[in-house]
Amino acid sequence: MSFNVYNLLWLLLPLAAMSGWLGASIEQKRRARRNAFDLPSAYFKGLNFLLNEQPDKAIEVFTQVLEVNSETVETHLALGNLFRRRGEVERAIRIHQNLIARPTLDKEQRSHALLELGQDYLKAGLFDRAENLFLELAEIRLHSEQALRLLLRIYQQEKEWGKAISSARKLARLSGENMNSVIAHYNCELAELAYSNKDYAAARGFVKEALSNDRKCVRANILLGDIEAEGNRHRDAIKAWKHIEQQDAHFLGDVAEKIADSYRRLGDENGVYEFFRSALERHQLIGLVLTFAETIRNREGIEAAEKFVVESLRRRPSVHGLHKLIELNLAEAQESNKDDLMLLRNIIEELREQHRGYACQQCGFRGKSLHWLCPGCNRWSTIKPVLEE
């Protein structure tokens, strides 16, 4: 019996040792878990401050617990982003520069930090530094699509249209996005610059390049007409402006007076009359109505012009047409009636101002002058004439 007990004790000893080892291992893991959760608990505390709109306290918490290692890189990036959004760009730059200096970062983490630092520089107006970082990212093909989009922002702001064209083409190849309409606007920017310098040959070349990129580029045909008219090639100018009808008829009213003027310079009053008569059969645009009213006035007299405007107002009432009708009446009104008509004209003029200018179809931005790149949403070709809406 004693022999069996003795043997049993020898058998239990290894089991006891194994049990002690397992217990110690489990306890060690529990402690590790507790330590592992200490840091995230601070992050949750900081997040709670953010959710309660207390960003200063959140930043204080994040800064106190933050140490750069592979587990906290994302927190560094988020904190730097937060500083940038708050306008504290210098602090954002320091955080992202500190990250990039760490040799422990892998390639993906470093490229992400470079992207964030580039955006810091962009926000600070340090375009050269931002450009260099985005060019590096575009070459190493990490975050390259976003880097190219940010490069376009820089080049548009700096009016470096040649670089913008190159970056847009790279972005098109990389993303599969059709950038032709945007590139056409860059060509038009170069054309406008050449046109302002009276280099009409170069301007014409850039416009034709724009149209080869985007056949529907209204801006290119407006410019081409201006260039041809400047060189007294009025038939070519009229041809260019007429083509706008197929591109976007909303803008036909914008060039109506230019078309009429070129016809008159050619001595072709019948041509201008037939063009507007025909165009108005297809498009009841108030811009065409107003210009045609003047054509009728010159050709047939004030009474015929008044009759035409009244008929147009019956089909499509507008404050612009009413304003034109009052002006025509003023031209032949007796002195006793002029004061009343002028008062009425001034009232209509105030209403008319609310229906003039241009508006973005995407963000609702409104302005008195035409912007091809919307200042509100930073998109091309989204602004249309309010007059024709």
Image: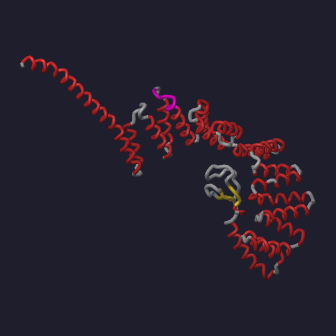
In this view, the residue in front, 112 or 199, is: 112
Q: Is residue 196 above or below residue 31?
A: below
Residue at the far left in the pictured view: 1
Residue at the far bottom in the pictured view: 336
Q: Position of residue 125 (x, y in %)?
A: 58, 41
Q: Position of residue 181 (x, y in %)?
A: 71, 46
| Image quarter hosting the C terminus | bottom right
> Toward which corner of the image does residue 12 lie, by quadrant?
top left
Residue at the far top in the pictured view: 3
In this view, the residue in front, 339 or 269, is: 269
Residue at the far right in the pictured view: 267
Q: Is residue 232 above or below residue 152?
A: below
Residue drawn where x is 46% and y is 40% of the image: 78
Q: Which residues are magenta?
A: 104-110
User: Residue 107 in magenta?
Assistant: yes
Q: Position of residue 253 (x, y in %)?
A: 77, 60
381 relative position to 66: left or right: right
Residue drawn where x is 79% and y is 50% of the image: 221
> Toward which corner of the image does residue 386 lie, by quadrant?
bottom right
User: Residue 201 in magenta?
Assistant: no
| Image quarter hosting the N terminus | top left
Q: Position of residue 197 (x, y in %)?
A: 79, 44
